[in-house]
């Protein structure tokens, strides 16, 4: 082999080796693989859930009045007052006492029946309901402070990141990796 051929083969081999080294160098990620989590602040929202609360209460009702004008009380009172007035006087005074007794007895009987009807009540138990709202909170995301090398920053994530956040090609990986079958959910 002549010298120029040897030189060509050597230079070719050197070129291929250098090209492979450059290509390999570009494929290797030289940056950090993770960003350190400095602080995590959960973001919450209030949820109001309505529910019905019922309780039994005793309610007093006025009994229906059958004799609105208290006729029975007036008649009974007038009869009793007339009999009593008839026992009191003599002669023409007896008639006057009977009429006065009947009038007074009628009035008294009317008022007695009116009071009795006003106090004639009955009780029932009724269920009374009202809607109340229970308040609870749920976590909707996380504000995460991180440090990537000398750079500090904040991102919002939909899950708690743990102690560090993966980095790929210099960018934070903010989505959760899918779980493998049979693997329990990660933190």
Image: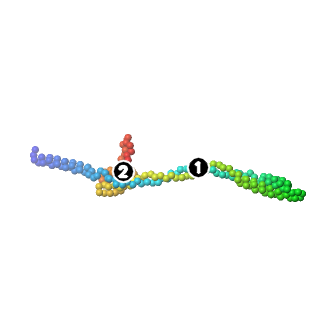
Give how far across and how far down residue 116 sits, in percent. Answer: 73, 53
Disc 1, disc 2: CB below 8 Å? Answer: no
Badge 1, how many Cα within 10 Å: few under 14, some, many 20+?
few
Q: Which residue is mark 1?
A: 55
From the viewer's perspective, tell me whether residue 12 is left or right of residue 38.
Answer: left
Label 1 and label 2: CA atoms lie apart by 47 Å
Mark 1, mark 2: which one is toward the viewer?
A: 1
Q: Secondary structure at mark 1?
A: strand
**Frontmost residue, 155 versus 160:** 160
Q: Position of residue 148 (x, y in %)?
A: 31, 55
Q: Which residue sits at x=34%, y=51%?
A: 163
User: Would residue 177 be seen by someone viewing this image from the given angle?
Assistant: yes
What residue is rendered at 34% in x and 53% in y?
37
Could you tell me residue 150's position as x and y percent?
Answer: 29, 57
Horizontal and vertical percent position of residue 62: 69, 52
Q: Nearer the viewer, residue 115 or 140?
A: 115
Residue farthest toward the top in the current orientation of the protein: 182
Horizontal side of residue 47 vs 183, given as left or right: right
Using the image as rendered, state which of residue 51 and residue 92 is in the foreground: 92
Query: Earlier along the polypeptide chain: callout 1 or callout 2?
Result: 1
Say which residue label 2 marks.
161
Question: Which label sits on residue 106?
Answer: none
Residue at image position (66%, 49%) is 123
Q: Secondary structure at mark 2?
A: loop
* Horizontal arrangement in the rendering, residue 31 relative to residue 4 (left or right): right
Q: Quadrant of the N terminus?
A: top left
């Amino acid at each position: 082999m002549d010298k120029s051929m040897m030189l060509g083969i050597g230079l070719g081999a050197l070129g291929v080796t250098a090209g492979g080294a450059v290509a390999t160098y570009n494929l290797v990620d030289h940056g950090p693989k993770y960003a350190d989590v400095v602080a995590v602040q959960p973001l919450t929202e209030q949820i109001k859930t309505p529910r019905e609360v019922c309780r039994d209460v005793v309610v007093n009702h006025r009994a229906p009045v059958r004799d609105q004008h208290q006729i029975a009380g007036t008649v009974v009172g007038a009869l009793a007052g007339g009999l009593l007035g008839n026992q009191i006087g003599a002669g023409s005074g007896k008639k006057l006492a009977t009429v006065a007794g009947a009038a007074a007895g009628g009035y008294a009987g009317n008022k007695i029946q009116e009071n009795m009807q006003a106090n004639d009540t009955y009780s029932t138990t009724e269920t009374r309901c009202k809607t109340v709202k229970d308040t609870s909170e749920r976590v909707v995301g996380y504000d995460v402070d991180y440090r990537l090398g000398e750079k500090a920053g904040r991102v919002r994530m939909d899950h708690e990141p743990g102690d560090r956040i993966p980095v790929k090609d210099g960018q934070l990986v903010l989505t959760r990796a899918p779980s493998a079958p049979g693997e329990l959910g990660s933190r």
